[in-house]
Amino acid sequence: FGSSGSGFCVLPLSLQTLASFVLAMAARYMILKDTVAEGAAVPEKVKLKITRDATLAKEKETAVAAAKKDHEEQRAALKMRTQEYEKEYANHQKKLIDLRREAKLGGNFFVEPEAKLLFVVRIVGI
């Protein structure tokens, strides 16, 4: 993968890299924690800012945790679906092997299954 002369490079992303990027998107804005010295006089606006940042930090933490949990659930569902498809494909292959062996033992021919194909022509005006 190289540069196309436009000044940027296209790089392939793995699924795991993409997933970590998506999780990082929810947590990409840092909420700074303001610390105030003990016994120091704190202006009203600074107090409001500290309380606002505290609530935003809590909301962000819950949102990131929810996004992570949702992502883990999606990954688990994807894994289960993949395992089901792999079982289905393996069973299909075993069935074809059994049919070939059965045909050979019976002295017959086994015709391999072909992909189903439809050829549709639409004639205008009819």
Image (spheres, grey):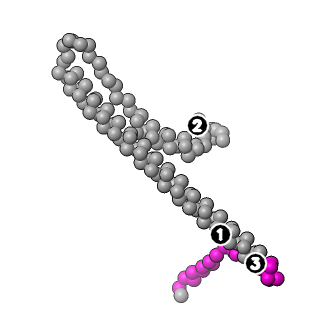
User: For this view, does 56 lie left or right of residue 64?
Assistant: left
First in sequence: mark 3 or mark 2? 2
Q: Is residue 109 visible?
A: no
Q: Dot 2: few (<14), some (14–19), or many (≥20) neighbours within 10 Å?
A: few
Please state which of residues 8 and 60 is positioned toward the viewer in this rendering.
Answer: 60
**What SS does tag 1 mark?**
helix
Amino acid at pointer 3: Glu
Residue 8: image tag: 2
Quadrant hosting residue 113: bottom right
Would you name the residue on which mark 1 appears? 92
Please state which of residues 96 and 111 is positioned toward the viewer in this rendering.
Answer: 96
Residue 102: image tag: 3
Q: CA distance from mark 3 to mark 2?
A: 59 Å
First in sequence: mark 1 or mark 2? 2
Q: CA distance from mark 1 to mark 2?
A: 46 Å
Q: Is 124 one of the magenta-colored residues?
A: yes
User: For this view, does 47 lie left or right of residue 113?
Assistant: left
First in sequence: mark 1 or mark 3? 1
